[in-house]
Amino acid sequence: MSKIILVTGANQGIGFQFAKQLGELGHTVYLGARDIKKGEEAVAKIGLKNVHPLLLDVTKEESIKESVKKIQQEQKHLDVLINNAGIAKYEGKPEVDVDLLKDIFDTNVFGVVRVTNAFIPLLKSSSSPIVLNVSSTVGSTGFVSDPNTTANSFLSYAASKSALNTYSILLSHLLQDVKVNFVSPGYCGTNLNNFAGTLDPKDTVKLMVERVVFAETTGQFYDYDGSKLDL
Ligand SMILES: NC(=O)c1ccc[n+]([C@@H]2O[C@H](COP(=O)([O-])OP(=O)(O)OC[C@H]3O[C@@H](n4cnc5c(N)ncnc54)[C@H](OP(=O)(O)O)[C@@H]3O)[C@@H](O)[C@H]2O)c1
């Protein structure tokens, strides 16, 4: 059955693949972009009538409010919210730059919280609502416990994904009628890592669409291939 889906940060990378592949399956997709021109260009590249650009900056309340209004007017409900927008920065030293930490949390954690809060009413109007938060293996306490973890270079980013994981689990308890899961999309070559990632987001998103997005579970941390990850 065709769903109404919003993907945040979808003008490039993993989010773009989510919008494209879900659109190709016939779902109505809102492709979120903080720069509407980039969103329109991405939609033109996809070339499907059922994929629409949506101005959405997850750090700006007003932008979120407008996007809720638009989807409310056009669809009356939202079936799937994919909180994908994210930023990362190499740090590699123990003295954390608190301004950077705040910026990263503002997008990766507070952004997800803001957008989710705002869309809860529209999600509750769906017969089978889903929230999928795009996290990372560096959000896993087990993963970062290795003294040589790659997360040592990205302390603020790893901390943000760890907070996102805890938020996702607790949200799954509190939002009993909504399935809330979170996923590691794999180490994909995208702008986020200067295309150093070894996986193609086309491939990992294909698996996430098949095995994770519409999972019947709630409160689960998935790897992109649908296997379960430890926290
Ligand atoms: N790539 C990996 O290996 C990897 C691994 C683990 C987790 N992840 C996660 O996967 C998600 C997608 O990352 P990606 O690799 O696809 O990175 P990407 O290519 O850099 O894409 C990130 C997207 O988020 C958008 N964005 C950033 N700040 C935003 C804001 N304030 N409001 C709205 N959109 C915003 C960007 O918009 P602009 O184009 O305007 O900058 C871009 O569209 C992130 O949550 C990331 O943490 C990625």
Image: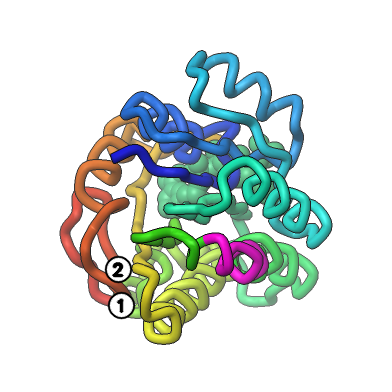
Callout 2 amino acid = Phe
Q: Position of residue 210 (x, y in %)?
A: 21, 42
Where 67 falls versus 38 (above or below)? below
The reply to whether dot 1 and dot 2 touch (C-beta < 8 Å) is yes
Where 49 falls versus 56 (above or below)? above
Helix, strand or loop for disc 1: loop
Q: Position of residue 84 (x, y in %)?
A: 51, 51
Write down the region rendered in magenta.
113-122
Quarter the C terminus occupies: bottom left
> Can the viewer see residue 230?
yes
- Tally of numbered tags: 2
Where 157 falls versus 3 (above or below)? below
**Of circles 1 and 2, which is in front?**
2
Q: Position of residue 155 (x, y in %)?
A: 55, 69
Q: Residue at x 46, y 44 (%)?
A: 4
> Can the viewer see residue 135?
no
What residue occupies the far left of the structure in this picture?
227
Q: Which residue is mark 1?
A: 231
- The quarter of the picture where residue 148 lies is bottom left
Query: Which is more toward the observer, 131 or 72?
Result: 72
**Pointer 2 local density, CA inside 10 Å: few below 14, some 14–19, many at least 20:** many
Helix, strand or loop for disc 2: strand
**Pointer 1 local density, CA inside 10 Å: few below 14, some 14–19, many at least 20:** some
Q: Position of residue 194 (x, y in %)?
A: 54, 36
Query: Which is more toward the observer, 134 or 97?
Result: 134
Callout 1 amino acid = Leu
The mark found on residue 221 in the picture is 2
